[in-house]
Amino acid sequence: MQTLQEQLNVIKEKVQKCTNCSLCKNRTKIVFSDGCETAPIMFIGEAPGKNEDETGIPFIGRAGQLLRKYMFECGFEANDFYIANTVKCRPPENRKPTKEEKSACFDFLNSQIELINPKYIILVGATALESFILDRKLSITKARGQIFEIGNRKFIPIFHPSYLLRYFNEYEGSPRDLFRKDLLMIKSLIKEV
Ligand code: URA
């Protein structure tokens, strides 16, 4: 019987050899995951950027550092979360991954979700939201901070931290204020788990 870590490594090795879409052509490293495999929450972001492609670690660039700063300010600990993206290779010029690219990568992401079996999946930004909640009228602004139950999974969309890079203030109701409130709500939910 394989351990959880071994099972995840099997998927990671498949991703390393993956040529399912053209994003494989320009990748330096695949960006598989970061964090704790037994965490109660799993963050799913959009796609690796330049820093992620170079290091193989998700959310390590400017936007990622902002996400991590807010998470730790809101009391998240290393064991609380696991992080992945809708695609494992960097799209050129940091464009959004296409539907086809996300589909080509979906089985890998889905296998990670099944193995991690998180209590809550945090959809970071509109691209992740659109991958899991198929309501085209639902914007990230409307969806953020709500809990969506789909099948046996609970999803909570939040703003993407790259959006916050454009808004510095934290007045009541600002993107940063709402982002912090959502993270505090998520942290309080996992305290109950
Ligand atoms: N870094 C990631 O790994 N994912 C994003 O969505 C943004 C930055």
Image (cartoon, rainbow, N blue to C red):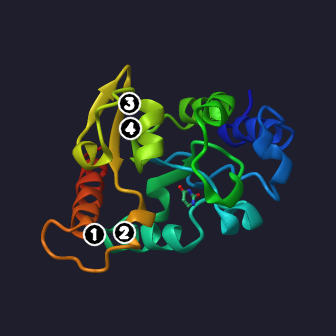
State the residue position of label 1: 176
State the residue position of label 4: 119
The quarter of the displayed image where residue 19 is located: top right
Give the tally of numbered discs.
4
- In front: mark 4 or mark 2? 2
Residue 163 located left or right of residue 33: left
Could you tell me which secondary element the residue under label 4 belongs to? loop
Q: Residue at x 82, y 53 (%)?
A: 26
- Percent position of residue 80, x then y: 43, 55
Of residues 119 and 158, the one nearer the viewer is 158
Q: Residue at x 69, y 30 (%)?
A: 104
Q: Amino acid at mark 2?
A: Leu
Numbered circle sitting on residue 133 = 3
Q: Amino acid at mark 3?
A: Ile
Between the C-alphas of marks 1 and 3, the distance is 23 Å
Between the C-alphas of marks 4 and 3, the distance is 17 Å
Between the C-alphas of marks 3 and 2, the distance is 22 Å
Q: Tag 1: Cα neighbours inside 10 Å, few (<14), some, or many (≥20)?
A: many
Q: Amino acid at mark 4?
A: Lys
Q: Residue at x 63, y 51 (%)?
A: 33
Quadrant holding the C terminus: top left
- In front: mark 4 or mark 3? 3
The quarter of the displayed image where residue 133 is located: top left
Between the C-alphas of marks 1 and 4, the distance is 25 Å
Could you tell me which secondary element the residue under label 2 belongs to? helix
- In front: mark 1 or mark 4? 1
Numbered circle sitting on residue 164 = 2
Between the C-alphas of marks 1 and 2, the distance is 6 Å
